[in-house]
Image (cartoon, rainbow, N blue to C red):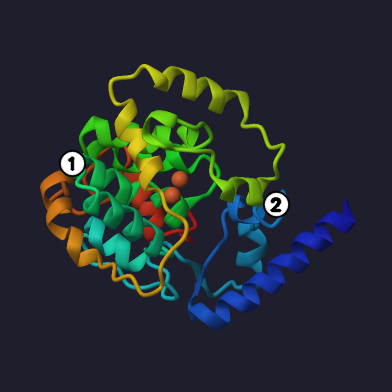
Amino acid sequence: MNDHTQTLSDRADALEERMMHELGERIATKSTLFHLADGEVTMDSGPALKAANPDKYFLMGADPRLPKMPDKPTLIDFFHNRFASLNHLLQSATLALKNGHSEKVILACLLHDIGVASFIRADHGYWGAQMIEPYVDEEVSWAVRTHQALRFFPDPSVGYEYPQMYVKYFGADYKPEPYIVAEYERARNHKYYMTSRLICVNDVYSFDPNAKVDLDDFIDIVGRNFRQPEEGLGFDNSPSAHMWRTLMWPTRFL
Ligand SMILES: [Fe+2]
Ligand SMILES: [Fe+2]
């Protein structure tokens, strides 16, 4: 037990030193999920950190290391300040635009991987769909959620094959989890099936570095199809407002 306490305390010291250096008077904490991603089942110890820094408070708002967000953030503000990469989203939406698809399909392509770009890879379709659900047509969020499963299954009727990239990434013998298979089975006869399938068709990995993609090309489509809350994303009391707030302030103590 002493060893364990020692380890936690060492960790807390190291963290505290780093954070104090970067944040001045505030101590930022990492959530358990961030530690799990490092292969450690642990959490930052509030009492230990506070004991080591009796004159400091924990961060309970914006993290000064991250880009500043406006008071009433829009989806576009999140694109610019919290999504780690826009290229894949923009190239997919650009392809959907070129292919003459509906605005719902284009928006679905633009948003299909925001779970990965901003939040978490695992079950990214589900997370991404939940984030946007209160603000888009149900067809769009359904398609975003379901593309995660459909990506693993070919559909010759639209020329969609199992992605070679998945063979490269996961191995030739990879089999999707039973819940993904079940999701696919349910989706096949759903009225929005093709919307989600079109995300897969336009979900391009190879990117021409010379191709011009620009978020500005989609501002109008977002404006017409994403119900931006007046109070700002995170402050409208929607069922997913907390997710946007967490993305805005990921290192708040509580
Ligand atoms: Fe995806
Ligand atoms: Fe994708």
- Mark 1 and mark 2: span between their CA atoms? 46 Å
Location of mark 1 (residue): 102
Q: Position of residue 179 (x, y in %)?
A: 56, 24
- The amino acid type, in three-letter code, at marker 1 is Ser
- Nearest to N terminus: mark 1 or mark 2: 2
The local crowd at label 1, few if under 14, some if 14 to 19, many if 20 or more residues have their Cα within 10 Å, is few
Residue at 53 percent across and 35 percent down: it is: 152
Q: Nearer the viewer, residue 56 or 13?
A: 13
Seen in the image, is 174 located left or right of residue 206?
right
Q: Nearer the viewer, residue 79 or 108?
A: 108
Query: From what the image shows, is residue 184 above or below residue 201?
Result: above
Q: Position of residue 77 (x, y in %)?
A: 26, 64
Seen in the image, is 175 located left or right of residue 205?
right
**Count of number-bearing discs:** 2
Q: Does the rendering let one see residue 144? A: yes
Which of pointers 1 and 2 indicates the residue nearer the eye?
Answer: 1
Seen in the image, is 38 located left or right of residue 64?
right
Query: From what the image shows, is residue 30 above or below residue 67?
Result: above
Q: Does the rendering let one see residue 130? A: no
What SS does tag 1 mark? loop
- The amino acid type, in three-letter code, at marker 2 is Thr
Residue at 31 percent across and 60 percent down: it is: 78
Q: Position of residue 85 (x, y in %)?
A: 42, 64
Seen in the image, is 58 located left or right of residue 106?
right
Picture quadrant where residue 194 is located:
top left
Q: Position of residue 156 (x, y in %)?
A: 44, 30
Location of mark 2 (residue): 42
